[in-house]
Amino acid sequence: MGTMSVKDSHSTSCHGKLLPNQGVRGSRWFRTVLPSVLFILAVGPWDVVSVSFANDNLFGPVWPSSFKRSLEERDVWKQELREVESFLQAYSRAMKAAVKLVGPSVVHIDAAGVQARSGVADNRQRQEDSGAGILIRLSDKMYVLTNRHVVNKATPSTIKIRLVDGQVLRPTAVWSDADSDVALLAVPNVDLPPAELGNSDEVEVGDFVLAVGSPFGLRHTVTFGIVSAVRRRGLQLGHAGLRVQDFLQTDAAINPGNSGGPLVNLKGQVIGLNTAIASNSGGNEGIGFAIPINLAIRVATQLAEHGRVRWGYLGVNLEDDFSPEKAAAVGLPHPYGALINQVVPGSPASAGGLRGGDVVLKFGDTWVEDDDHLIYLVSITSPGESVPVLVWRDRQQVQLTVQLGERGAQ
Protein backbone atom coordinates (compact mmCIF):
# COMPACT_ATOMS: atom_id res chain seq x y z
CA MET A 1 0.00 0.00 0.00
CA GLY A 2 1.40 3.34 -0.99
CA THR A 3 2.17 6.16 1.36
CA MET A 4 -0.24 9.06 1.18
CA SER A 5 1.39 12.39 0.64
CA VAL A 6 -0.19 15.81 0.87
CA LYS A 7 0.79 18.13 -1.92
CA ASP A 8 0.41 21.78 -2.76
CA SER A 9 -2.16 22.19 -5.53
CA HIS A 10 -0.24 24.64 -7.66
CA SER A 11 0.95 23.86 -11.13
CA THR A 12 4.63 23.92 -11.95
CA SER A 13 6.14 23.99 -15.39
CA CYS A 14 9.79 24.13 -16.37
CA HIS A 15 10.60 25.38 -19.84
CA GLY A 16 6.96 25.02 -20.94
CA LYS A 17 6.45 21.41 -19.78
CA LEU A 18 3.17 21.05 -17.89
CA LEU A 19 4.15 19.16 -15.12
CA PRO A 20 -34.43 18.93 -3.78
CA ASN A 21 -40.15 16.66 -3.48
CA GLN A 22 -43.34 17.54 -4.79
CA GLY A 23 -44.67 15.29 -7.53
CA VAL A 24 -42.16 12.59 -6.67
CA ARG A 25 -43.43 9.23 -5.56
CA GLY A 26 -41.58 9.05 -2.26
CA SER A 27 -39.37 6.11 -1.52
CA ARG A 28 -39.60 4.59 -4.98
CA TRP A 29 -37.92 7.64 -6.43
CA PHE A 30 -35.10 7.39 -3.94
CA ARG A 31 -34.66 3.66 -4.61
CA THR A 32 -34.71 3.88 -8.36
CA VAL A 33 -34.32 7.23 -10.04
CA LEU A 34 -32.06 9.08 -7.63
CA PRO A 35 -29.13 6.64 -7.88
CA SER A 36 -29.35 6.86 -11.66
CA VAL A 37 -29.50 10.64 -11.60
CA LEU A 38 -26.52 10.87 -9.29
CA PHE A 39 -24.65 8.48 -11.56
CA ILE A 40 -25.39 10.66 -14.57
CA LEU A 41 -24.23 13.73 -12.64
CA ALA A 42 -21.05 11.95 -11.68
CA VAL A 43 -20.25 10.64 -15.15
CA GLY A 44 -21.19 13.83 -16.96
CA PRO A 45 -23.19 14.43 -20.10
CA TRP A 46 -20.28 13.98 -22.48
CA ASP A 47 -18.87 10.70 -21.23
CA VAL A 48 -19.69 7.47 -23.00
CA VAL A 49 -20.55 4.53 -20.79
CA SER A 50 -19.75 1.15 -22.24
CA VAL A 51 -21.69 -1.85 -20.88
CA SER A 52 -20.94 -5.44 -21.81
CA PHE A 53 -22.80 -8.63 -20.94
CA ALA A 54 -21.53 -12.15 -20.64
CA ASN A 55 -24.09 -13.16 -23.26
CA ASP A 56 -22.69 -12.15 -26.65
CA ASN A 57 -26.09 -12.61 -28.30
CA LEU A 58 -27.55 -9.52 -26.61
CA PHE A 59 -29.86 -8.54 -29.45
CA GLY A 60 -30.72 -12.11 -30.46
CA PRO A 61 -33.44 -14.39 -29.09
CA VAL A 62 -31.97 -14.52 -25.58
CA TRP A 63 -32.54 -11.36 -23.48
CA PRO A 64 -31.41 -10.82 -19.90
CA SER A 65 -34.72 -10.58 -18.04
CA SER A 66 -33.80 -7.38 -16.18
CA PHE A 67 -32.73 -5.68 -19.41
CA LYS A 68 -35.94 -6.72 -21.22
CA ARG A 69 -38.04 -5.49 -18.30
CA SER A 70 -36.20 -2.19 -18.38
CA LEU A 71 -37.09 -1.73 -22.05
CA GLU A 72 -40.75 -2.51 -21.36
CA GLU A 73 -40.80 0.15 -18.63
CA ARG A 74 -39.33 2.96 -20.72
CA ASP A 75 -42.52 5.05 -20.43
CA VAL A 76 -42.40 4.65 -16.65
CA TRP A 77 -38.81 5.85 -16.56
CA LYS A 78 -39.63 8.81 -18.78
CA GLN A 79 -42.40 9.82 -16.38
CA GLU A 80 -40.07 9.44 -13.41
CA LEU A 81 -37.54 11.72 -15.06
CA ARG A 82 -40.19 14.31 -15.91
CA GLU A 83 -41.16 14.37 -12.23
CA VAL A 84 -37.64 15.16 -11.07
CA GLU A 85 -36.69 17.38 -14.00
CA SER A 86 -37.68 20.63 -12.29
CA PHE A 87 -35.56 19.75 -9.28
CA LEU A 88 -32.55 18.93 -11.41
CA GLN A 89 -32.94 22.09 -13.45
CA ALA A 90 -33.13 24.20 -10.29
CA TYR A 91 -30.04 22.43 -8.99
CA SER A 92 -28.17 23.11 -12.20
CA ARG A 93 -29.28 26.75 -12.28
CA ALA A 94 -27.96 27.24 -8.74
CA MET A 95 -24.53 25.97 -9.70
CA LYS A 96 -24.38 28.05 -12.87
CA ALA A 97 -25.49 31.18 -11.00
CA ALA A 98 -22.80 30.63 -8.36
CA VAL A 99 -20.12 30.28 -11.04
CA LYS A 100 -21.29 33.41 -12.86
CA LEU A 101 -21.30 35.37 -9.61
CA VAL A 102 -17.79 34.46 -8.54
CA GLY A 103 -16.23 34.15 -12.01
CA PRO A 104 -15.30 37.81 -12.62
CA SER A 105 -13.44 37.85 -9.29
CA VAL A 106 -11.19 34.88 -10.06
CA VAL A 107 -7.75 35.51 -11.51
CA HIS A 108 -5.03 33.34 -13.00
CA ILE A 109 -1.50 33.83 -11.70
CA ASP A 110 1.76 33.07 -13.46
CA ALA A 111 4.78 33.48 -11.21
CA ALA A 112 8.28 33.02 -12.58
CA GLY A 113 11.21 32.58 -10.25
CA VAL A 114 14.81 31.49 -10.40
CA GLN A 115 15.82 28.46 -8.37
CA ALA A 116 19.23 26.97 -7.72
CA ARG A 117 19.64 23.54 -9.30
CA SER A 118 21.52 20.65 -7.70
CA GLY A 119 22.48 22.86 -4.78
CA VAL A 120 24.88 24.92 -6.89
CA ALA A 121 24.28 28.63 -6.49
CA ASP A 122 25.26 29.64 -10.02
CA ASN A 123 23.62 26.66 -11.75
CA ARG A 124 20.15 28.10 -11.95
CA GLN A 125 16.97 27.36 -13.86
CA ARG A 126 13.89 29.42 -14.50
CA GLN A 127 10.86 27.91 -12.74
CA GLU A 128 7.33 28.96 -13.62
CA ASP A 129 4.50 28.33 -11.16
CA SER A 130 0.86 28.92 -11.90
CA GLY A 131 -2.18 29.10 -9.69
CA ALA A 132 -5.25 31.19 -9.06
CA GLY A 133 -6.48 33.89 -6.72
CA ILE A 134 -9.45 36.12 -5.98
CA LEU A 135 -9.98 39.85 -6.10
CA ILE A 136 -10.79 41.33 -2.70
CA ARG A 137 -11.20 44.86 -1.42
CA LEU A 138 -9.73 46.03 1.88
CA SER A 139 -10.08 49.65 3.02
CA ASP A 140 -11.14 50.72 -0.49
CA LYS A 141 -8.04 49.20 -2.08
CA MET A 142 -7.96 46.25 -4.44
CA TYR A 143 -5.86 43.16 -3.79
CA VAL A 144 -5.46 39.61 -5.00
CA LEU A 145 -5.63 36.91 -2.33
CA THR A 146 -3.82 33.65 -3.04
CA ASN A 147 -1.48 31.07 -1.53
CA ARG A 148 2.06 31.94 -0.55
CA HIS A 149 3.49 28.88 -2.27
CA VAL A 150 2.16 30.13 -5.61
CA VAL A 151 4.27 33.30 -5.54
CA ASN A 152 7.00 32.83 -2.96
CA LYS A 153 9.76 32.13 -5.51
CA ALA A 154 8.88 35.20 -7.59
CA THR A 155 9.21 38.96 -7.37
CA PRO A 156 6.52 41.52 -8.26
CA SER A 157 8.15 42.06 -11.65
CA THR A 158 7.94 38.36 -12.53
CA ILE A 159 4.29 37.84 -11.50
CA LYS A 160 1.52 38.17 -14.08
CA ILE A 161 -2.13 38.36 -12.96
CA ARG A 162 -4.60 37.57 -15.73
CA LEU A 163 -8.13 38.90 -15.22
CA VAL A 164 -11.31 37.42 -16.66
CA ASP A 165 -11.62 40.34 -19.09
CA GLY A 166 -8.18 39.66 -20.54
CA GLN A 167 -6.22 42.34 -18.70
CA VAL A 168 -2.80 41.39 -17.41
CA LEU A 169 -1.62 43.14 -14.25
CA ARG A 170 1.62 43.25 -12.32
CA PRO A 171 1.36 43.52 -8.54
CA THR A 172 2.74 46.70 -7.03
CA ALA A 173 3.60 44.90 -3.79
CA VAL A 174 3.56 41.33 -2.47
CA TRP A 175 3.25 40.21 1.15
CA SER A 176 3.04 36.67 2.44
CA ASP A 177 2.85 34.64 5.65
CA ALA A 178 4.57 31.28 5.89
CA ASP A 179 2.63 30.12 8.97
CA SER A 180 -0.72 30.22 7.11
CA ASP A 181 0.40 29.94 3.45
CA VAL A 182 -1.49 33.11 2.56
CA ALA A 183 -0.22 35.80 0.19
CA LEU A 184 -1.62 39.22 -0.65
CA LEU A 185 -0.84 41.09 -3.86
CA ALA A 186 -1.56 44.80 -4.21
CA VAL A 187 -2.98 45.65 -7.63
CA PRO A 188 -4.38 48.78 -9.29
CA ASN A 189 -8.12 49.30 -8.96
CA VAL A 190 -9.92 47.52 -11.78
CA ASP A 191 -13.48 47.65 -13.05
CA LEU A 192 -14.27 44.15 -11.80
CA PRO A 193 -16.17 43.15 -8.64
CA PRO A 194 -14.33 41.80 -5.62
CA ALA A 195 -15.36 38.34 -4.52
CA GLU A 196 -18.34 38.02 -2.20
CA LEU A 197 -17.12 36.38 0.98
CA GLY A 198 -19.05 33.82 3.01
CA ASN A 199 -18.65 32.89 6.67
CA SER A 200 -16.45 29.82 6.86
CA ASP A 201 -17.36 29.34 10.54
CA GLU A 202 -20.86 28.35 9.34
CA VAL A 203 -19.68 25.72 6.87
CA GLU A 204 -20.89 22.19 7.63
CA VAL A 205 -19.99 18.75 6.38
CA GLY A 206 -22.22 17.94 3.43
CA ASP A 207 -22.45 21.48 2.07
CA PHE A 208 -22.21 21.61 -1.73
CA VAL A 209 -19.18 23.49 -3.01
CA LEU A 210 -17.48 24.47 -6.25
CA ALA A 211 -13.73 24.76 -6.73
CA VAL A 212 -12.52 27.30 -9.29
CA GLY A 213 -8.97 27.58 -10.47
CA SER A 214 -6.40 26.85 -13.14
CA PRO A 215 -5.53 23.15 -12.94
CA PHE A 216 -2.62 22.40 -15.27
CA GLY A 217 -2.88 25.98 -16.52
CA LEU A 218 -6.50 25.56 -17.72
CA ARG A 219 -7.91 28.84 -16.51
CA HIS A 220 -11.34 29.22 -14.88
CA THR A 221 -11.96 25.49 -14.55
CA VAL A 222 -14.87 24.60 -12.24
CA THR A 223 -15.32 21.33 -10.32
CA PHE A 224 -18.07 20.27 -7.93
CA GLY A 225 -18.33 18.35 -4.66
CA ILE A 226 -19.16 18.61 -1.00
CA VAL A 227 -17.40 19.64 2.18
CA SER A 228 -16.26 16.28 3.47
CA ALA A 229 -14.71 17.47 6.75
CA VAL A 230 -13.96 20.65 8.67
CA ARG A 231 -11.24 21.73 11.07
CA ARG A 232 -8.50 19.51 9.69
CA ARG A 233 -5.26 20.20 11.54
CA GLY A 234 -1.89 18.62 12.00
CA LEU A 235 -1.45 17.83 8.29
CA GLN A 236 2.01 17.15 6.97
CA LEU A 237 1.99 19.38 3.93
CA GLY A 238 4.40 19.63 1.06
CA HIS A 239 6.06 22.72 2.44
CA ALA A 240 7.53 23.39 5.86
CA GLY A 241 6.45 25.87 8.50
CA LEU A 242 2.68 25.79 8.04
CA ARG A 243 1.77 25.97 11.72
CA VAL A 244 -1.69 27.60 11.58
CA GLN A 245 -4.03 24.92 10.28
CA ASP A 246 -7.85 24.70 10.34
CA PHE A 247 -8.59 23.35 6.87
CA LEU A 248 -11.86 22.62 5.14
CA GLN A 249 -11.72 19.26 3.37
CA THR A 250 -13.53 18.70 0.07
CA ASP A 251 -13.98 16.03 -2.57
CA ALA A 252 -14.34 18.63 -5.33
CA ALA A 253 -11.57 17.85 -7.79
CA ILE A 254 -8.45 19.87 -7.01
CA ASN A 255 -5.35 19.45 -9.09
CA PRO A 256 -2.02 21.22 -9.60
CA GLY A 257 -2.86 24.81 -10.53
CA ASN A 258 -5.91 25.11 -8.25
CA SER A 259 -3.87 26.66 -5.46
CA GLY A 260 -5.17 30.04 -4.34
CA GLY A 261 -8.44 29.62 -6.20
CA PRO A 262 -11.75 29.91 -4.38
CA LEU A 263 -13.86 27.20 -2.79
CA VAL A 264 -17.40 28.54 -3.33
CA ASN A 265 -20.81 27.75 -1.82
CA LEU A 266 -24.02 27.69 -3.88
CA LYS A 267 -24.63 31.34 -3.03
CA GLY A 268 -21.52 32.22 -5.00
CA GLN A 269 -19.67 33.16 -1.82
CA VAL A 270 -16.05 32.28 -1.26
CA ILE A 271 -15.64 30.11 1.83
CA GLY A 272 -12.05 29.00 1.35
CA LEU A 273 -8.82 29.13 -0.63
CA ASN A 274 -7.92 25.81 -2.26
CA THR A 275 -4.47 24.94 -1.03
CA ALA A 276 -3.43 21.29 -1.03
CA ILE A 277 -4.38 17.73 -1.93
CA ALA A 278 -3.74 14.33 -0.35
CA SER A 279 -2.52 12.09 -3.13
CA ASN A 280 -0.48 9.01 -3.91
CA SER A 281 -0.22 9.97 -7.56
CA GLY A 282 0.22 13.74 -7.45
CA GLY A 283 -3.24 14.29 -8.95
CA ASN A 284 -6.74 14.51 -7.56
CA GLU A 285 -7.87 11.51 -5.53
CA GLY A 286 -10.89 13.11 -3.87
CA ILE A 287 -9.24 14.74 -0.86
CA GLY A 288 -8.49 18.43 -1.10
CA PHE A 289 -7.91 21.08 1.53
CA ALA A 290 -8.86 24.76 1.62
CA ILE A 291 -7.91 27.52 4.04
CA PRO A 292 -11.13 28.89 5.63
CA ILE A 293 -11.82 32.33 4.22
CA ASN A 294 -12.26 33.86 7.69
CA LEU A 295 -8.69 32.90 8.52
CA ALA A 296 -7.36 34.00 5.14
CA ILE A 297 -9.00 37.44 5.43
CA ARG A 298 -7.67 37.85 8.98
CA VAL A 299 -4.19 37.25 7.65
CA ALA A 300 -4.72 39.46 4.59
CA THR A 301 -5.94 42.37 6.71
CA GLN A 302 -2.81 42.29 8.85
CA LEU A 303 -0.57 41.98 5.81
CA ALA A 304 -2.23 45.02 4.21
CA GLU A 305 -1.99 47.08 7.40
CA HIS A 306 1.36 46.01 8.82
CA GLY A 307 3.14 43.99 6.16
CA ARG A 308 3.25 41.00 8.50
CA VAL A 309 1.03 38.89 10.75
CA ARG A 310 1.20 38.97 14.54
CA TRP A 311 0.47 35.48 15.85
CA GLY A 312 -0.11 34.71 19.51
CA TYR A 313 2.59 32.89 21.49
CA LEU A 314 2.22 30.80 24.66
CA GLY A 315 5.58 29.11 25.14
CA VAL A 316 4.93 25.41 25.76
CA ASN A 317 5.99 22.11 24.25
CA LEU A 318 3.00 19.82 23.80
CA GLU A 319 2.61 16.04 23.72
CA ASP A 320 1.60 15.04 20.21
CA ASP A 321 0.36 11.59 21.29
CA PHE A 322 -1.97 12.18 24.25
CA SER A 323 -3.25 8.61 24.44
CA PRO A 324 -6.06 7.12 26.58
CA GLU A 325 -3.37 5.54 28.74
CA LYS A 326 -1.68 8.88 29.39
CA ALA A 327 -5.05 10.48 30.13
CA ALA A 328 -5.89 7.73 32.63
CA ALA A 329 -2.51 8.19 34.31
CA VAL A 330 -3.41 11.79 35.20
CA GLY A 331 -7.00 10.95 36.18
CA LEU A 332 -8.85 11.94 33.01
CA PRO A 333 -11.43 9.58 31.48
CA HIS A 334 -10.67 10.66 27.91
CA PRO A 335 -7.62 12.10 26.11
CA TYR A 336 -9.27 15.46 25.44
CA GLY A 337 -7.19 18.58 25.82
CA ALA A 338 -3.52 19.32 25.28
CA LEU A 339 -0.86 17.82 27.55
CA ILE A 340 2.06 20.13 28.30
CA ASN A 341 5.41 18.39 28.30
CA GLN A 342 7.50 21.45 29.07
CA VAL A 343 7.07 25.17 29.69
CA VAL A 344 9.61 27.48 28.10
CA PRO A 345 11.40 29.51 30.80
CA GLY A 346 10.50 33.21 30.72
CA SER A 347 7.55 32.59 28.39
CA PRO A 348 3.95 33.84 28.79
CA ALA A 349 3.02 30.31 29.89
CA SER A 350 5.63 30.40 32.64
CA ALA A 351 4.54 33.86 33.79
CA GLY A 352 0.92 32.69 33.84
CA GLY A 353 1.64 29.71 36.09
CA LEU A 354 1.41 26.84 33.62
CA ARG A 355 3.51 23.76 34.39
CA GLY A 356 4.74 20.67 32.66
CA GLY A 357 2.20 17.89 33.16
CA ASP A 358 -0.77 20.26 33.02
CA VAL A 359 -3.52 19.36 30.58
CA VAL A 360 -5.07 22.43 28.98
CA LEU A 361 -8.82 21.77 28.95
CA LYS A 362 -10.15 25.17 27.94
CA PHE A 363 -8.58 28.19 26.30
CA GLY A 364 -10.72 31.30 26.58
CA ASP A 365 -14.28 30.19 25.86
CA THR A 366 -13.28 27.15 23.81
CA TRP A 367 -12.81 23.57 24.99
CA VAL A 368 -9.55 22.23 23.63
CA GLU A 369 -9.69 19.10 21.48
CA ASP A 370 -6.01 18.29 21.16
CA ASP A 371 -2.54 19.79 20.79
CA ASP A 372 -3.10 21.04 17.22
CA HIS A 373 -6.33 22.73 18.31
CA LEU A 374 -4.52 24.58 21.11
CA ILE A 375 -1.80 25.71 18.72
CA TYR A 376 -4.47 27.14 16.42
CA LEU A 377 -6.38 28.86 19.25
CA VAL A 378 -3.23 30.47 20.61
CA SER A 379 -2.07 31.54 17.16
CA ILE A 380 -5.26 33.42 16.24
CA THR A 381 -5.37 35.26 19.58
CA SER A 382 -3.87 38.74 19.53
CA PRO A 383 -0.52 39.18 21.29
CA GLY A 384 -0.93 41.05 24.58
CA GLU A 385 -4.42 39.68 25.19
CA SER A 386 -5.08 38.10 28.60
CA VAL A 387 -6.85 34.76 28.26
CA PRO A 388 -8.43 32.53 30.94
CA VAL A 389 -6.96 29.05 30.76
CA LEU A 390 -8.50 26.02 32.50
CA VAL A 391 -6.06 23.20 33.19
CA TRP A 392 -6.16 19.76 34.78
CA ARG A 393 -3.51 19.46 37.49
CA ASP A 394 -3.16 16.92 40.29
CA ARG A 395 -6.55 15.41 39.39
CA GLN A 396 -8.46 18.66 39.70
CA GLN A 397 -9.28 21.73 37.63
CA VAL A 398 -7.18 24.86 38.08
CA GLN A 399 -8.10 28.25 36.59
CA LEU A 400 -5.28 30.49 35.38
CA THR A 401 -4.92 33.64 33.28
CA VAL A 402 -2.17 34.02 30.70
CA GLN A 403 -1.14 37.13 28.78
CA LEU A 404 0.02 36.00 25.37
CA GLY A 405 3.18 37.15 23.68
CA GLU A 406 3.96 37.40 19.98
CA ARG A 407 5.45 34.51 18.08
CA GLY A 408 8.86 35.34 16.75
CA ALA A 409 9.39 38.29 19.10
CA GLN A 410 11.33 36.30 21.69
Image (cartoon, grey):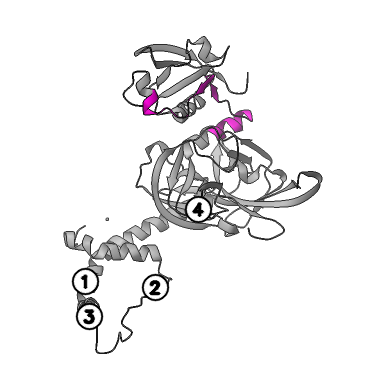
Where on the picture, by quarter, is residue 62?
A: bottom left
Query: Identity of the amino acid at label 1?
Result: Gln
Nearer mark to the viewer, of 3 and 1: 3
Residue 112 is situated, as x and y percent measured from the top left of the image, at: 70, 50
Extent of the magenta region: 299-326
Q: Secondary structure at mark 4?
A: loop
Task: Write down the residue under mark 3.
Answer: 68
- How crowded pointer 1 is (Cα within 10 Å; few <14, some 14-19, many 20+) is rated as few
Residue drawn at x 22%, y 60% is: 30
**In this rendering, is residue 270 above or below 86?**
above
Asked if labels 1 and 2 touch by Cβ distance under 8 angstroms, the answer is no
User: Residue 390 shows which numbered tag?
Assistant: none
Q: CA distance from mark 4 to mark 1?
A: 37 Å
Residue 19 is situated, as x and y percent measured from the top left of the image, at: 63, 58
Where on the picture, by quarter, is residue 77?
A: bottom left
Residue 328 is situated, as x and y percent measured from the top left of the image, at: 35, 22
Task: Write down the residue under mark 4.
Answer: 254
Q: CA distance from mark 2 to mark 1?
A: 23 Å
